[in-house]
Image (spheres, rainbow, N blue to C red):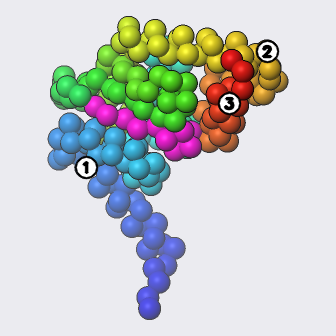
């Protein structure tokens, strides 16, 4: 049995990455492939679709920059079983695709929210690789449901487990790491089973 040398493996990886961002692929198809890889939590595939300085700009203005932060976010999404669905996908110029983004996850379901919908997600490409994902605002219904559910949960968590809450949500912001997602889910499950 022949085993590839480290140089051969490195070359194969470089070829794979360059194929991942091949310029002859329609950007709408690239976005569909990207979402499919995200929903499978395939960090190898996702790494091949993004630039090293990729940025995620959240609807509240927070920015996660760089491939390391991006892959940490994918780890969070994996633990929380986050799935994306796109609707109304369209090419808006030669480097930008927009769509409506629906998100389901275990933590949304545990909060009793189900699916949340962002009016818009904007995928910006550089050399056929994703350079930035801008997640637009929630629809009014989604925002209202999520804010109400979070307010109830956070009031309980702040009263019962303030230190745990501060650890998984430092400075009032989610810490997008896989281990923190597990802590977040555990705390929501305790809220569910306890007295609200």
Q: Which residues are magenta?
A: 76-86
Secondary structure of the residue carrying numbered label 1: loop
Q: How many marks?
A: 3
Q: Residues within 10 Å of mark 2 (few under 14, many from 20)?
A: few
- Cα separation, mark 2 vs mark 3, equals 16 Å
Question: Sequence-wise, which precedes: disc 1 or disc 2?
Answer: 1
Q: Nearer the viewer, residue 152 or 119?
A: 152
Residue drawn at the location 51% of the way across and 24% of the way down: 112
Tag on residue 193?
3
User: Where is mark 1, residue-wise?
Assistant: 22
Secondary structure of the residue carrying numbered label 2: helix
* Residue 48 is covered by the magenta coloring: no
Is residue 25 shown above or below 175? below
Q: Residues within 10 Å of mark 1 (few under 14, many from 20)?
A: some
Q: Position of residue 111 (x, y in %)?
A: 55, 24
- Cα separation, mark 1 vs mark 2, equals 52 Å
User: Where is mark 2, residue-wise?
Assistant: 159
Question: Sequence-wise, which precedes: disc 2 or disc 3?
Answer: 2
Q: Is residue 1 visible?
A: yes
Is residue 173 shown above or below 27? above
Among all residues in the image, which is located at the extreme bottom?
A: 1
Secondary structure of the residue carrying numbered label 3: helix
> Which image quadrant: the C terminus?
top right
Is residue 178 shown above or below 64? below
Q: Nearer the viewer, residue 34 or 166?
A: 166
Residue drawn at the location 80% of the way across and 20% of the way down: 160
Q: Nearer the viewer, mark 1 or mark 3?
A: 3
Q: Residues within 10 Å of mark 3 (few under 14, many from 20)?
A: few
């Amino acid at each position: 049995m022949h085993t590839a040398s480290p140089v051969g493996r490195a070359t194969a990886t470089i070829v794979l990455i360059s194929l991942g961002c091949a310029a002859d692929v329609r950007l709408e198809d690239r976005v569909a492939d990207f979402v499919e890889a995200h929903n499978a939590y395939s960090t190898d595939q996702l790494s091949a679709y993004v630039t090293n300085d990729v940025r995620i700009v959240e609807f509240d203005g927070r920015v996660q920059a760089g491939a390391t932060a991006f892959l940490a976010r994918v780890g969070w999404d994996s633990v929380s079983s986050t799935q994306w669905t796109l609707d109304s996908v369209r090419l808006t110029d030669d480097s930008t695709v927009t769509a409506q983004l629906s998100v389901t996850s275990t933590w949304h379901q545990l909060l009793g929210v189900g699916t949340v919908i962002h009016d818009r997600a904007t995928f910006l490409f550089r050399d056929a690789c994703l350079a930035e994902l801008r997640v637009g605002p929630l629809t009014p219904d989604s925002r209202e449901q999520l804010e109400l559910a979070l307010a109830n949960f956070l009031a309980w968590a702040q009263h019962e487990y303030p230190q745990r809450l501060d650890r998984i949500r430092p400075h009032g912001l989610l810490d997008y790491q896989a281990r923190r997602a597990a802590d977040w889910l555990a705390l929501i499950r305790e809220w569910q089973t306890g007295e609200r």
